[in-house]
Amino acid sequence: MLKTLDYLTLGSDKQRQAHRVINSLGIMNELSMYTPVLCGTLSIEVDVEGSDLDIIMEVADFNQFEKRVRTLYEDKQNFKIKRLTIRDLPVIKANFIFEGFEF
C-alpha cells in the first residue's frame, strides 16, 4: 500500500490535477485517523469520463465519523451521506464535488 499520493505527480494530466485537488481539500490529513487510501480507476490510470476519486477508510464509530465528515464537507457541492449494508457489512458513504472532482 502506498503511504503518499506523490506518485500521482508523475502520472497523467488528470492524475496530477487530482493530486492538487486532494491536497487542496486536505482530506487525507483531515481524516488521517481513519487511514484513508485512494483507490479506484483514477489512481491506476484506467479512469474513464466521469470517474471519481474513491477514498476508502477504516471506521469503527460511524456516528463520530459521520459527524466529522459533515463538519468538514457538508458545505461542498452535491454533498450527501448515507448508511447501507454491502456484503453483510455496514458501510457509510459520503459523496461531494470539489474543484470539479467527485469524491
Image (cartoon, helix red, strand yellow):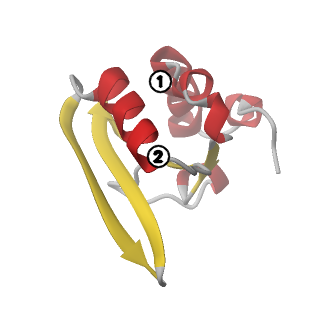
Give how far apart the Cα atoms at labels 1 and 2 are: 10 Å
x, y percent for residue 83:
31, 60
Q: Residue at left 40%, top 50%?
A: 52
Instruction: Report which residue position mark 2 lands on.
Output: 53
Quadrant assignment for the C terminus: top left
* 94 up-or-down from 74: above or below: below
**Relative side of 53 to 82, left or right:** right
Q: Is residue 90 visible?
A: yes
Residue 21 got which mark? 1
User: How dense is the environment of label 1, judged by Cα within 10 Å: few (below 14), some, or many (20 and up)?
Assistant: some
**Relative side of 102 to 17, left or right:** left
x, y percent for residue 3:
81, 37
Q: Is residue 100 visible?
A: no
Q: Determine the image quadrant of residue 23.
A: top right
x, y percent for residue 73:
32, 27
User: How dense is the environment of label 2, judged by Cα within 10 Å: few (below 14), some, or many (20 and up)?
Assistant: many
Q: In front: 88, or 46?
A: 88
**Relative side of 67 to 5, left or right:** left
Q: Say which amino acid is labelled 2.
A: Leu
**Relative side of 23 to 102, left or right:** right
Q: Residue at left 68%, top 41%?
A: 35
Classify mark 2: helix, strand or loop: loop
Q: Residue furthest left?
A: 78
Q: Residue at left 51%, top 27%?
A: 27
Residue 35 got which mark? none
In contact (CB < 8 Å): disc 1 and disc 2:
yes
* 63 up-or-down from 69: above or below: below
Q: Say which amino acid is labelled 1.
A: Val
Q: Earlier in the sequence, mark 1 or mark 2?
A: 1
